Amino acid sequence: MAQVGDVGADGLMQGASLLSRPADEFGNDETVEAMWAIKAFKHAEVYFNLLSSVDPKLLRLTPQDDVIYKEFRSKFPDLKVDLIKEDEIKSADGKEMWRPFCEQYKDSVEDYSFGTLLRLDCTDEFSEKNTTLVPRIQFYAIEIARNREGFNDAVREKFRKKN
């Protein structure tokens, strides 16, 4: 598998354009998997840097934040977003509950199903132990709730860069 350092800027750009093509064209192409992983990691890094430097309650992740939050809390009123239990969202029952929620955003949220890294414990940073892979709309729903309900405030307090 190609390492990031071996790919170069041209390779990354070429890989990024590949990621917009239908997945069934590729099978299990290692280059596409590497490019996808790089894109997911970069998204996580940018988002965490935002959380560390801006009041999370002021962040808008999509133009549809209000709708996503309202629908999320209507479908999942008791889901604890501060500490996600992976089996609650990835079990067969969890997937059945989430699938209709996610699919309703197919035409309105860009890359709604794109694999995105989500922190399980919102008070900590991305790490192998604290990260799971979810569809982008599931990331948005949980992170919008964390921001609005004050759970991501801890990130800013704990990881803010001191100048």
Image: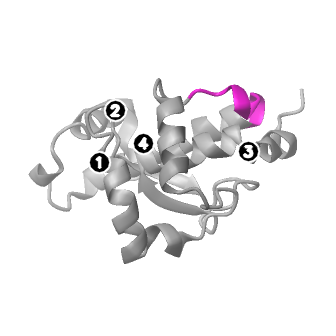
Q: Which mark is residue 20?
A: none
Does residue 157 appear left or right of residue 96 in this picture?
A: right
Residue 56 covered by magenta stretch: yes
Residue 7 covered by magenta stretch: no
Q: Residue under circle 2?
A: 110
Q: CA distance from mark 1 to mark 3?
A: 26 Å
Does residue 51 appear left or right of residue 39 in this picture?
A: right
The quadrant of the image that shows the N terminus is: bottom left
Q: Of discs 3 and 4, which sits in the foreground?
A: 3
Q: Secondary structure at mark 2?
A: loop
- Residue at 34% x, 32% y: name it: 110
The x, y position of residue 108, in whole percent, is 32, 31
Q: CA distance from mark 2 to mark 4?
A: 15 Å
Q: Please, what is the three-letter code of the amino acid marked with disc 1? A: Glu
Magenta segment boundaries in residue numbering:
52-60
Q: Please, what is the three-letter code of the amino acid marked with disc 2? A: Glu
Residue 152, by quadrant, is top right
- Residue at 57% x, 61% y: name it: 131
**Of callouts 3 and 2, the N-terminal one:** 2
Q: Secondary structure at mark 1?
A: helix
